[in-house]
Amino acid sequence: MSLYEYLAFSKLGKKIKGIIHADSIEDAKGILQVKNISALKIALIEKKFKSLNKTEVLTFFQQLKNLLQAGLALYESLQILAEKSDKRKIKLTIFDLSEKIKLGYSLAEALEEHPKSFDLITRAMIDNAQQSGRLEETMDEIIKILSNSLKLKKKLITAFTYPIILSIFCFVVLNFLLFVTIPTLFDLFEDRSLHPFTKIVFTTSKFAINNKLFIILGIFLCISFVFCAFFYLPFRKKIIKQLIKAPVIKSFLVKVALIRFFISYASLLKGGEAYENALELSTNVLDHPILQQEFIAMKEKLIEGKHLSELLKDSEYIPNEICKMLSIAEESSQMPKMLLNIAKIYEEEVDKFLTRISTIIQPVLLILLGFIVGFVVLSILIPLTDVSSFLGE
C-alpha cells in the first residue's frame, strides 16, 4: 500500500488537505467517496520519508506517551499526532506509522520502516516493551535517553560557540586590516624609512594582497574540511581516529562516548534485553571507533559466561575504578543503576572540562585579538608621529 495526498472541499466550503493509505489512486478515490469527500486532486506520495531529527523524535514520544496515559489507543493517538502536526515530514511519518498499526503491524515493526528516524536501540526497547506490556514506562526511558543526548550536545555546542564566533571575528578583523585599511597607507609612507613594526605589517599586507587567490582557496579548503568533518561520515570517522590519539582530547572523547553507551546499555537492561544483545545494540551509539571494536569483541566472551567488569580491565580506555564499580554491580544485580551512576559521574567530569576549556580559550582569544589590533595600530602610529614632526618643520 502507498500513501496518497488529496485536496478537497470541506462542508463549509474550505479547502482541506489530507492523507490516506490505499493500493492505487482508484482505491483512494473509492475510500474518499465512502467518506463523502469530493477530492479535487489526489497525488501519490513518494515512499522516501525525510528523517526526523532527535528533537522531533523526542517531541513525538513525549506527546505519544501523554496520549497513551490519557487512555487513548495507540492507533488513535498516532492519528491525533499526525493531524495536529504542522511539519509535513512529521505528519507523513506519523501517518505512515498509524496506517502500519491499522494493518496489524506492531509499533516496533512500524518504526523499522523509518530506520533513519528511529535507531536500533529505540526499536529494540519498544519491541521488548510491547512483549512485556511496559510501553509507557519504556517511552519514559527513551525520552530520558534522547533528553540526555540532546542535553550533552547542547553543552558541547554552547562551550565551543563563543570561541568559534570570536575566532571568526578575529579572522574578519585581520583580513579587513590587511586588505582594506593598511593598503590605503602605502602611498603615505612611500620612500620613507619605516619602523620595524611598520615594515612587518606592510610586508604582511602586501604578501596577502599578492597571494589573495591562494588565501581564498585556503579558506575554501578549510570550510570544506569542516563541512566534511561534520556531514560526511567516512571522513568524520577518520578525523575521530586522529583526535582520539591527542593527549587531552583523548580522555574527553572517551567520556562523551561512554556516557551515551552506559545510558543506552542501562535502559536496554531495564527493558529486559539480554546482556550480550544489549551490549551489541549499545555499541551503535558509540561515536568512537576503537571503543566500538573493543565492545563488539566482548559479545562472544559475555556469551561464554565472562563478566563485563573482567573484560573491561583489558581496555586502556576504561579506568580501574569503573571496572570495580561494575564488578560490585554484577554481584548485587544492580547493573542498570550502576551504569547510570557512572554515566552521571562522567557527565559531571565533562561539564567541568568544558567549563575549564571555555574559561581558558575565551581570554586567550581576546588577548590575541587585542594584540593583533594593538600591533597594527602601533605600527601605524609610530611613523605618523614622525610625519607630523616632519610636516611641522
Image (tube, helix red, strand yellow):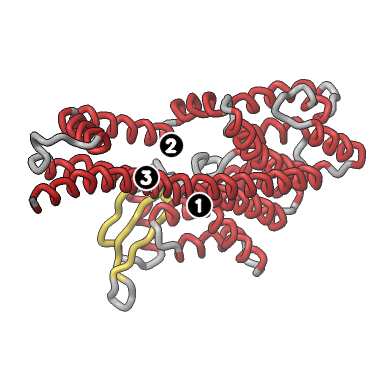
Q: Quadrant of residue 380?
A: top left
- The mark lying in front, picked from 2 and 3, is 3
Name the residue tied to disc 2.
230
Total number of numbered discs in the rendering: 3
Q: Please name the amino acid that badge 3 sits on.
A: Phe
- Tell me if residue 384 comes above or below residue 7 in the rendering: above
- Label 2: how many residues lie within 10 Å, few (<14), some (14-19) or many (20+)? few
Q: Residue furthest front?
A: 393
Q: Which residue is mark 3?
A: 371
Q: Tag 2's secondary structure?
A: helix
Q: Which circle, 2 or 1, is nearer the viewer?
A: 1
Q: CA distance from mark 3 to mark 1?
A: 26 Å
Examine the rendered structure and indicate whether residue 177 appears above or below residue 192: below
Mark 3 crowdedness (10 Å alpha carbons): few <14, some 14-19, many ≥20: few
Look at the numbered discs 2 and 1 and tell me whether their residues touch, using CB distance below 8 Å. no
Q: Earlier in the sequence, mark 2 or mark 1?
A: 1
Gap between marks 2 and 1 measured at Cα: 17 Å
Which residue is located at x 19 percent, y 32 percent?
Answer: 212
In the image, residue 279 above or below residue 27: above
Q: Quickly name the residue at label 1.
A: 158
What residue is shown at x 71% (from left), y 32% (from top)? 279
- Local secondary structure at mark 3: helix
Q: Is residue 117 left or right of residue 68?
A: left
